[in-house]
Image: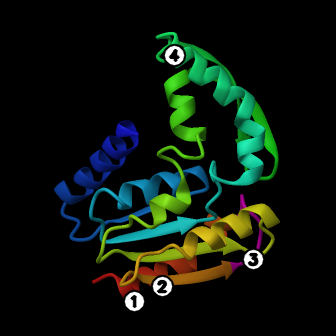
Amino acid sequence: MDGVVAEIGTAVKSLKDKGADKVCVAGHSLGAAGAIYYAGRVQVDCLIVLAPGHFPEGKAMRGWTQQDLAKAKEMVAKGEGDDKAWFEDYNTGNRTKKVRMSAKVYIEYFDGDGPMNMTSNVSRILPGTRVLWVVGAEETEGAKRMGGMAYQKMPAGISTQFVEVPGGHVTVPGKAIEVATAWIRDNVQ
């Protein structure tokens, strides 16, 4: 997960080097999970969560990934954690595909008790962060339920706004442009 923090940090630094006073970190789906992870470790001016969709801690995801996690953990135990293998990538909307990645990376992203546990990461968002959480009205029921549970774990004292926009998981970023722009204008000074 160091790569996630470093990549977002590089982008934030670049914007600040160009004169930005405030920077909002935003992400969609798995990107939202990464942005939340970052906001729990590095102070940000604001966080925009668009259709959060990576919940390895969920019962369904745990069931789907059980076999590949066992394979990845076995590889790590054999000292082959940096070796690449084919794993199933489970995506919101029951979209899956085989991806080739290291066993360690697969575990980081898909172990329900690991670093990408969104519910746990939401509870670590640093004080002073303003959060806009946007979901689609036609989002899958599982993602709505898990996203709602994660949202409820927001730390006390965090300024939050929950907004539902028309559309489904993939269309949320486009549907949220006006909402996010107005929210930034009104909340980030």
Amino acid type, residue under disc 1 in the picture:
Asp
Disc 4 versus disc 2: distance between alpha carbons? 50 Å
Residue 176 visible in the current orientation = no
| Crowd band around label 1 with a 10 angstrom C-alpha radius: few (<14), some (14–19), many (20+) | few
Q: Quadrant of residue 62?
A: top right
| Crowd band around label 4 with a 10 angstrom C-alpha radius: few (<14), some (14–19), many (20+) | few
**Residue at image location 69% in from the left, 78% down from the top:** 165
Residue 60, how many percent across, how many down? 77, 50
Q: Is residue 112 above or below residue 176?
A: above
Disc 4 versus disc 1: distance between alpha carbons? 51 Å
In magenta, the rendered stretch is 165-171
| Crowd band around label 3 with a 10 angstrom C-alpha radius: few (<14), some (14–19), many (20+) | some
| Crowd band around label 2 with a 10 angstrom C-alpha radius: few (<14), some (14–19), many (20+) | few
Disc 2 versus disc 3: distance between alpha carbons? 17 Å
- Pointer 3 or 1: first along the chain: 3
Disc 2 versus disc 1: distance between alpha carbons? 6 Å
**Residue at image location 40% in from the left, 82% down from the top:** 156
Amino acid type, residue under disc 4 in the picture:
Ala
Residue 102 placement, left or right of 87: left
Secondary structure, mark 3, is loop
Residue 89, how many percent across, how many down? 70, 35
Mark 2–mark 1 CB contact (< 8 Å): yes
Residue 93, how many percent across, how many down? 80, 52
Residue 182 — which label? 2
Residue 186 — which label? 1
Q: Quadrant of the N terminus?
A: top left
Q: Quadrant of residue 43?
A: bottom left
Amino acid type, residue under disc 2 in the picture:
Ala
Residue 153 placement, left or right of 144: left
Secondary structure, mark 1, is helix
Residue topped by disc 4: 77
